[in-house]
């Protein structure tokens, strides 16, 4: 269990609306919801850059496998 620190936050109206909606949907209390949101957000903010895979269209195969495949099906 984590040790708790009491703080006061000023939250924008749009964030307040989202928190209220999520609290009703999940049936949880505001403290737990804010802690979860902060943990997720901070984890995403401190994570390294996401790896991206690039794909390129290089044309049709010239090895003859395309025509061999079509003959079997």
Image: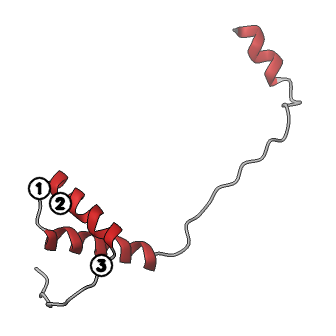
Residue lying at 12% horizontally and 88% vertically, measured from the top left? 3
Please name the residue that numbered disc 3 is placed on. Answer: 11
Outermost residue on the front side: it is 13
Separation of marks 3 and 2 at Cα, in angstroms: 15 Å
Please identify, in this view, whether the residue under mark 3 or under mark 1 is nearer the observer: 3
Q: Mark 1 highlights which residue? A: 27
Q: Quadrant of residue 45?
A: bottom left
Number of callouts: 3
From the viewer's perspective, is residue 28 above or below residue 8?
A: above
Quadrant of image for the N terminus:
bottom left
Measuring from the top left, give residue 28's x and y in whole percent: 12, 61
Q: Is mark 3 on a helix, strand or loop?
A: loop
Q: Which residue does the image show at 29% across and 74% down from the upper left?
A: 39
The residue sitting at 24% across, 65% down in the picture is 19
Question: Compared to 63, does 3 lie above or below?
Answer: below
Asked if the residues shown at circle 1 and circle 2 are in contact, with their CB atoms under 8 angstroms apart, the answer is yes
Quarter assignment of residue 36: bottom left
Q: In which quarter of the image is the C terminus?
A: top right
Q: Decide which of 54, 71 is in the foreground and name it.
A: 54
Does residue 58 appear left or right of residue 52 in this picture? right
**Mark-to-mark CA distance, 3 and 1:** 21 Å
Structural crowding at the residue carrying mark 2, measured as other residues with C-alpha within 10 Å and reported as few (<14), some (14–19) or many (≥20): some
């Amino acid at each position: 269990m984590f040790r708790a620190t009491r703080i006061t936050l000023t939250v924008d109206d749009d964030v307040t609306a989202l928190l209220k909606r999520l609290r009703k949907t999940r049936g949880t209390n505001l403290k737990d919801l804010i802690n979860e949101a902060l943990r997720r957000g901070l984890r995403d903010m401190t994570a390294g850059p996401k790896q991206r895979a690039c794909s390129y269209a290089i044309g049709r195969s010239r090895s003859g496998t395309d025509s061999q495949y079509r003959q079997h099906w």
